[in-house]
Amino acid sequence: MTTILAQLTDALASGQITVVDLTQPLGPQTPVIGLPPIFAPSPGFSSEVISHYDEKGPAWYWSTIHLGEHTGTHFDAPVHWITGKDLPDNTLDTIPARRLIGPACVIDIHREAAADPDFLLMPEHILAWEAEYGRIPAGAWVLLRTDWSQRQTAEEFLNVGPDGPHTPGPHLSAVELLVSRDVLGFGVETVGTDAGRAGMFEPPFPCHTLMHGAGKYGLASLCNLDRLPPTGALVIAAPLKIVDGSGSPVRVLALTPG
Ligand code: MN
């Protein structure tokens, strides 16, 4: 093991392994998912300076932060959804640390999503990916590349029309296939792991419903997925260890070859 870790250290130092940051900046401008007004909204990020090398703290700068757990690039724990509420190890403080690291399978639908913002990942897309790159291994993060993170404004990113949001995501049948592969979780570049239209699907929000019901995790608002190979990257996604936490902002790192 020492040898393997020494090799990893050397590979990082020499650039044979690159660290790709899959995380969006987190600040007051970070877009937050909108819900119908009958539901409670989740607040975006705000902060307040405690001291800034001043009379409140002459040598130190620090702030308080206030935000919903599911703000910006963030992690969804199984307890986030009612289907996962009674599972073991379903909160941020009980998820085993080993499960915060896994290989990445990157499925690229960025062209389809550019042509149709309501594009849905279907089982045939996953099976075609597997025909080319091999079966998705158990314990893998499946990451959906849409290039949605490259949209510059919150308006473009959330893409809300008069009838609600329009963003790509997985079809129920694709989620069923991913659960059958025993993935670690599903990650997306959009504001949530379900498609914008998914509130009207049957069942509503199939990715949240099935993934979390199966003890799987979610990653939302990722970026730089265009810098990852289809296979071969290792993702580290370690959320805050909030007691009974349903999710948290997370710094997601990918180790990639070359
Ligand atoms: Mn979430």
Image (cartoon, rainbow, N blue to C red):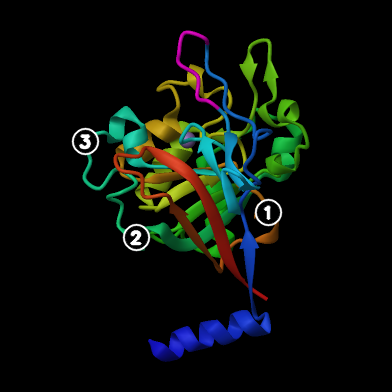
Say whether residue 38 is magenta: yes
Residue 211: % across, % down: 38, 40
Q: In terms of secondary structure, where does tag 3 sit?
A: loop
Q: Is residue 212 above or below residue 59?
A: above
At x 64%, y 11%, the residue is 163
Q: Where residue 18 sits: x, y (%)?
A: 65, 72
Q: Amino acid at mark 3?
A: Asp
The disc, 3 or 2, on the residue closer to the chain's N-terminal end is: 3
Using the image as rendered, state which of residue 77 and residue 176 is in the foreground: 77
Mark 3 and mark 2 in contact? Answer it, CB < 8 Å: no
Task: Read off the magenta span.
Answer: 37-43
Q: Which mark is residue 23?
A: none
Find the distance from the CA under tag 3 to the CA under tag 2.
20 Å
Task: Say which of marks 2 and 1 sits in front.
Answer: 2
N-terminal label among 2 and 1: 2
What residue sits right under mark 2 in the picture?
97
Q: Earlier in the sequence, mark 1 or mark 3?
A: 3
Along the viewing direction, whichever of 170 and 173 lies nearer the viewer: 170
Instruction: Report the amino acid beneath label 2.
Output: Ala
Gap between marks 2 and 1 measured at Cα: 24 Å
Q: Is residue 223 above or below residue 191?
A: below
Q: Which residue is mark 1?
A: 224
Magenta span main SS: loop
